[in-house]
Image (cartoon, grey):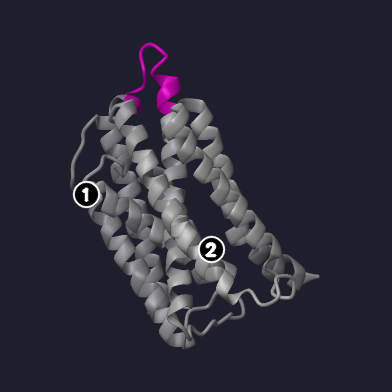
C-alpha cells in the first residue's frame, strides 16, 4: 500500500508537469493548472504518514529528510500560487519531488528515529523544514528571475518569459520569501543551540557553521536590498550562494555519514 501511494504521487507529479509544459506551449494560463500537484502532495503526505506509523516515528535518514523537505517546498509553492504567479516553478520542482520520493520508496536505509521530547525540539524541527522550504523556493525564483532578466534583453524574448509577471513583481515576491525564510532560520538556529551539548561529538560542527554562514548571507542580502538597492545579478548570485551553503548544512553531513562512511 505504501509503495502504491508513492507511485501514485509520482504519477500525479508527472501529470502536472506535463500539464504545465502543455500550457507553456499553447501560451495559456489557468488557475486549475496545479490540481494534480495538490493531489500529488496529498498522496506524498499520506506516504510519509504511513511510513511514520510503520516505523513508530519519523526516520531522519537522508532520503526521508529530503522527501519531507521537498514536500514542504511543494506546499510552499502551492500555497503561494493561490495569490502569486509562481506556478511555473513547478516545471522544475515537481519532477524533482517525484525523483526524491521514488528514491525514498526504493532505497530502505536503517531508520534513524529521533523522539521529540520537548516543545523546543518540535519548534526547531518545524522551523528548520519551513526555513529550507521557503529559501529553496526563493532560490528557484532567483534562477527564474536571472533567466527572465537575460531573456528580456533579447529580441524577441521567448514565450516562457512572456508568460511570467513583471520583473518588479518577481523581485518583490523573491525578497518576501527570503524575509520569511530568514525569520524561520533564525528561530531554527536559536532553538537548535539548546540541544548542542558537544558540537563535535554530535557531528554538528560543520552543519552549525554552514547554517550560520548561510543565515549571515541571507541577512546581508536583505540589508543590501534595503540600504543599497541590491537587485539583478548581484542579488541572485548571493541568494544562490546562501542556499548552497544551507543545502550543504542540511544534507552534506547526512550524505557523508550515511551513504559514504557506512560503505567504508
* Quadrant assignment, res 91: top left
Q: Position of residue 48 (x, y in %)?
A: 41, 74
Secondary structure at numbered mark 1: loop
Of the 4 image quadrants, the one containing the N terminus is: bottom left
Range covered by the magenta-colored residues: 147-161
How many C-alpha atoms fall within 10 Å of the one at disc 2: few (<14), some, or many (≥20)? some
Magenta stretch contains residue 263: no
Residue at the extreme right of the image, as rendered: 264
- Image location (x, y in percent) of residue 192: 55, 69
Q: Which residue occupies 48% across, 77% down? A: 121
Q: Name the residue under label 2.
A: 189
Q: Nearer the viewer, mark 2 or mark 1?
A: 2
Earlier residue among tags 2 and 1:
1
Q: Where is residue 164 in the image (x, y as percent from the top left)?
A: 30, 30
Residue at horizontal 35%, vertical 43%? 176
Residue 159 on the magenta segment = yes
Residue at 57% x, 53% y: name it.
246
* Residue position for label 1: 82
Up/down of 122 relative to 162, above or below = below
Amino acid at each position: 500500500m505504501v509503495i502504491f501511494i508513492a507511485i501514485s504521487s509520482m504519477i500525479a507529479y508527472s501529470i502536472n508537469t506535463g500539464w504545465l509544459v502543455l500550457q507553456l506551449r499553447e501560451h495559456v494560463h489557468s488557475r486549475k493548472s496545479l490540481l494534480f500537484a495538490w493531489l500529488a502532495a496529498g498522496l506524498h503526505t499520506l506516504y510519509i504518514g504511513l511510513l511514520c506509523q510503520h516505523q513508530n516515528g519519523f526516520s531522519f535518514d537522508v532520503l526521508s529528510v529530503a522527501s519531507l523537505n521537498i514536500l514542504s517546498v511543494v506546499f510552499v509553492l502551492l500555497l503561494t500560487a493561490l495569490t502569486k504567479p509562481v506556478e511555473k516553478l513547478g516545471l522544475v520542482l515537481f519532477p524533482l519531488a517525484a525523483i526524491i520520493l521514488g528514491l525514498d520508496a526504493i532505497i530502505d536505509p536503517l531508520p534513524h528515529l529521533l523522539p521529540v521530547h520537548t516543545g523546543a525540539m518540535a519548534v526547531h524541527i518545524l522551523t528548520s523544514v519551513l526555513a529550507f522550504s521557503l529559501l529553496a523556493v526563493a532560490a528557484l525564483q532567483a534562477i527564474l528571475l536571472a533567466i527572465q532578466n537575460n531573456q528580456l534583453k533579447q529580441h524577441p524574448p521567448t514565450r516562457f518569459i512572456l508568460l511570467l509577471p513583471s520583473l518588479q513583481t518577481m523581485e518583490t515576491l523573491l525578497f518576501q520569501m527570503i524575509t520569511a525564510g530568514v525569520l524561520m532560520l533564525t528561530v531554527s538556529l536559536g532553538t537548535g543551540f539548546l540541544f548542542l551539548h558537544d558540537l563535535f561529538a554530535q557531528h554538528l560542527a560543520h552543519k552549525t557553521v554552514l547554517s550560520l554562514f548561510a543565515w549571515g548571507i541571507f541577512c546581508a542580502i536583505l540589508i543590501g536590498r534595503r540600504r543599497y538597492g541590491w537587485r539583478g545579478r548581484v542579488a541572485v548570485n548571493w541568494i544562490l550562494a546562501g542556499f548552497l551553503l544551507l543545502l550543504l548544512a542540511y544534507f552534506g553531513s547526512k550524505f557523508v555519514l550515511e551513504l559514504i562512511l557506512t560503505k567504508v
